[in-house]
Image (tube, rainbow, N blue to C red):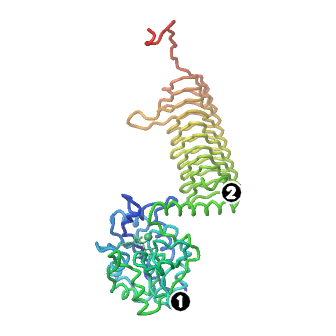
Amino acid sequence: MSGGQTLTAGIILAAGEGTRMHSAHPKVLHTLAGKTFLQRVMTSVTALNPELTAVVVHHQADLVAQAARSYDSQVRIVRQDSRPGTGRAVQCAVDQLDGELRHDGQVLIVASDMPLLDADTLHSLLDYHVSSGDGATVLTVNLDDPTGYGRIIRDQDGRVLRIVEQRDATGTELAVKEVNTSVYVFETDLLRQAVRGLDDSNAQGEFYLTDALETARRLGRVGAFAAPDPLKVEGVNDRVQLADLAKAHNLRVCREFMRQGVTILDPSTTWIEDDVVIQQDAVILPGCFLQGHTEIASDAVIGPYTTLIDAIIEPQAKVERSRVQETRIGARANIGPWTYLRAGNVLAEDTKAGAFVEMKKATIDHGTKVPHLSYVGDAHIGHDSNVGGGSITANYDGVHKNRTEIGSEVHVGAGNLFVAPVQVGDGVTTGAGSVIRHPVEDGAMVYSTNDQHEVPDWKPAWER
Ligand code: UD1
Ligand code: CA
């Protein structure tokens, strides 16, 4: 860290109820692009290496605390009491962390309902704060529509005087477009003094953290730093704002991939989470959800209407209209349309899992095709085999999951049933409609009979 900069603490405010979400779940555990708001904000704050990171909880405290610990086992949990407000949250934090906060250095305070807040923005804020020599700095943003946000009130010389909340603002104050993002840096000792005197004499009857700036101004200098990228500091109070923000973020992600050489036919229906990797010349058709740690190699074609979760797709594979979870798909494989690949499949190169095929923990060796209407679960099929339409592995006996082993260069007739556990050797041919219950030797032909009975001149009941 550069001179003068010692980040004593990062305090994340996550105690609010999030009333405007109208949700049984805490607001900070709602997700944007697959990660909770809390996880996103914690990741950005810890990237600044504060000496300690604290999360303030109250509403559904245990749930939020548990989530926070799952993201960072070192995190300090601060419990806010029943007195409401962002100011009260910081008072509780300062009280409960007091022995651990050094006297010099800075404290970063961050609301947790700003899921796109990034470490770059926080770094710039901290650098600005330290070089300005101010006692406190608020991160601001200029908005065309500032409705709902606290307005930054400055004097004639442009110095920050205070922040006034929407509900406490006069007509002229409401016209101000520069707003508070709810991110602040305070000199540690100044913060202690500034939050001490807070009260709840305002329209909402809450302890406002924003009022601490006024005290800070009386004790020192207060400054403001405008966020370089307004999207990164947008707050989410309701689900309309969440949808708008997720959409704007996703469009950026898609555009970045396009600039790097990925073809995305329709970015407005393509949803890509942050940890996804896509190599150049991959083609993403409309309606795809690329999630988790999915990786897509060059020249693969994905979609339309495909969901990939933690899937690894090798070059030139084609995955259409399917759902793929924790699965590895080899080069030139052809998946879909309407294929459902659940966890743990490995499809080698030049394989096929075709229309209305479901697989789970299936290992399909190179060149093998399962083209139509099949279920392959807990099974291994060797290379260059073909499975006739409508064939099923009966892997569940009501208690255990059992394995099916099918060899290489096997021709499975249509409509076969493999009653696991069962092994079929290499080079086997099975007749249509066979029920395979017993091991089959290499090179054999196997069929099971299924007598055909014919009732002449039969009439359905309603005709009789
Ligand atoms: C707050 C700011 C406002 C700013 C806006 C930016 C205040 C008084 N107002 O308003 O100036 O423009 O954020 O989005 O600070 N929280 C607690 N304990 C509480 C209440 C809230 O920890 O008792 C947490 C919430 O979980 C949330 C954050 O503080 O993460 C902000 O609370 P919220 O109610 O969303 O504040 P806003 O009304 O948006
Ligand atoms: Ca808010």
Marks 1 and 2 sit apart, C-alpha to C-alpha, by: 46 Å
Residue 95 shown left or right of residue 11 in the figure: left
| Residue under the point 69% across and 57% down | 280
Q: Is mark 1 within 8 Å of ligand 1?
A: no
Residue 94 shown left or right of residue 377 in the figure: left
Q: Which mark is residue 122?
A: none
Q: Is mark 2 within 8 Å of ligand 1?
A: no
Image position of 345 with respect to 110: above or below: above
Q: Find residue 204 and report its horizontal and vertical position in percent.
A: 34, 74
Residue to which mark 2 is pinned: 262
Under tag 2, what secondary structure? loop
- Answer with mark 1 or mark 2, whichever residue precedes in sequence: 1
Q: Residues within 10 Å of mark 1 (few under 14, many from 20)?
A: few
Q: Amino acid at mark 1?
A: Gly
Quarter the C terminus occupies: top left
- Residue in the foreground of this view, choosing between 139 and 154: 154
Q: Find residue 164 and report its horizontal and vertical position in percent.
A: 43, 80
In the image, farthest residue toward the front: 171
Residue to which mark 1 is pinned: 158
Q: Amino acid at mark 2?
A: Val
| Residue under the point 37% across and 69% down | 16
Q: Residues within 10 Å of mark 2 (few under 14, many from 20)?
A: many
